[in-house]
Image (cartoon, coloured by chain):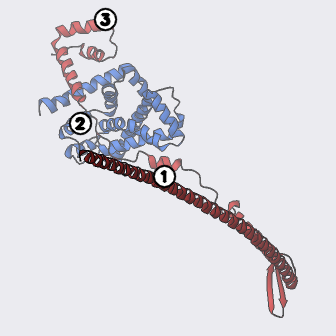
Amino acid sequence: MSCPKTQYLLQEYFSDELAPLTREELDRHLETCEFCNLELESLLFTQSNLQQWQDQRVPHWDRGLALFRQDHRAPKPNAGFWSPWQWIPTAASFAMLCLLLLNVNVVANEAGFSLAFGSQSSTQEVTQELQAQLDSLQASQRDEMQQLVIRMETRQDSNNIRLLQAVMDQSQRITTENFETMYTYFEDQRLTDLQDMRSAYQQLVDSDYETIRSLQQLVNYVGYADVVR
Amino acid sequence: MSLINEDEALIAAALNGSAYAWEKLVKRYEGKIYNQGLRLTGNPTDAMDLMQEVFLGVYRNLHRFRGDAKFSSWIFRIAHNKAIDLNRRKRLLSNQTSSLDQDEFSGFEALASGEKFEPENRLNKQQQNRRVMKMLAEIPMDQRLIVELKIFQSRTFDEIAQMQDISVNTVKTRFYAALKKLKVVSEENYVLP
């Protein structure tokens, strides 16, 4: 059993936007036509089978990075034989060598020869000049040393005087303190002695008074005895 | 930042020489392109070749990408064209080697016979995908492309017609014919194991 409408209708069924009329026609036909219904179900089943696909992982690859880096590599600097940068150090070295050779001065004498750089002055002149410079330097150093010694002595004397003054002040202060201490001590001692003497005198007076009373009692007793007799 | 804007930013950076941007751009699409290649060629080796050719084409023509269309559409169009080219080359090669009676994509058999290509994947996933690839191998390339675009990339019949430069009715007819053929294969695979 087949249906002449199957292909047309099912092609339209899978269309993206089915017109309403076509949709109605399709639904109506599917309700009545068992063949088309079964055909649609099997096609949908097939479609669902295909949709069971699960994405697989991509095997490792370099993702074109080697080519990318090769194309985007920075251009190399010009490093040829006639590159100006290569010759600059050589030219500078050559210029320095020329300057050096032009300023060399060779002087030959009995002792041999001497090599000098710079101006063409003779050795003796140079020696005398150096000697004069040395003498003046020594003289200036000597004067400076003498001034320094005088300054040091002056400073030392003033320091000594100050030290002596300080020592004297210190000793004077100590002596004064000692005198004051002695004075205080003697004064205390004097007051103590005076008090002792006063108390001793008082005792003496008291004992004299006692003696007088005894004598008086004795006199009284003697007098009474005489009366009785 | 939306995905489209992010694509454009990555393209601009890659054009300025950023290898990192290029790698990121490739990583975003390599999975989809590789799986599309697997479904269209049925062979991991050919799928890799196809994917590399696609990205080489993208790289060579990246400066021509104007941004008036989505980058994803552009790259899938390149993949589509490369798949047709690859199929044509393979067919010519198989004609030259007088192996006309062999299957159009002998890679399916290689894939079905062993698991050496994806040893880390789970068996179920492999089996499902292998079954799908076996089904797709039973239909010709023009129908396979339409099934790929319609079912796996959810394109409309109008878009497919525009991409393949054929009429919408032809697309519908081919899709229906592909589904009918696939139905037979599916019934053999599932109903009558």
**Left or right: A37 with respect to B177?**
left
**Are callouts 2 and 3 both on one chain?**
no
Q: Residue at x 27, y 25 (%)?
A: B177
Which residue is at the front of the view, B120 or A133?
A: A133
Q: Position of residue A217 (x, y in %)?
A: 30, 47
Residue lying furthest left? B192
- The disc at residue B101 is none
Q: Residue at x 23, y 34 (%)?
A: B132
> Can residue A103 be seen?
no
Mark 2 falls within which chain? B
Q: Quadrant of residue A126?
A: bottom right
**Are callouts 2 and 1 both on one chain?**
no
Q: Residue at x 32, y 42 (%)?
A: A58
Residue beneath disc 1: A191
Q: Amino acid at mark 2?
A: Asn
**Are callouts 1 and 3 both on one chain?**
yes
Mark 3 residue element: helix
* Pointers 2 and 1 in contact (C-beta within 8 Å): no
Residue lying furthest front? A229
* Pointers 1 and 3 in contact (C-beta within 8 Å): no
Mark 2 residue element: helix
Q: Position of residue A32 (x, y in %)?
A: 17, 8
Residue at mark 2 to residue at mark 3: CA–CA distance: 38 Å
Residue beneath disc 3: A21
Colour for chain A in the figure? red
Q: Residues within 10 Å of mark 2 (few under 14, many from 20)?
A: many
Q: Amino acid at mark 3?
A: Leu
Residue at mark 2 to residue at mark 1: CA–CA distance: 133 Å
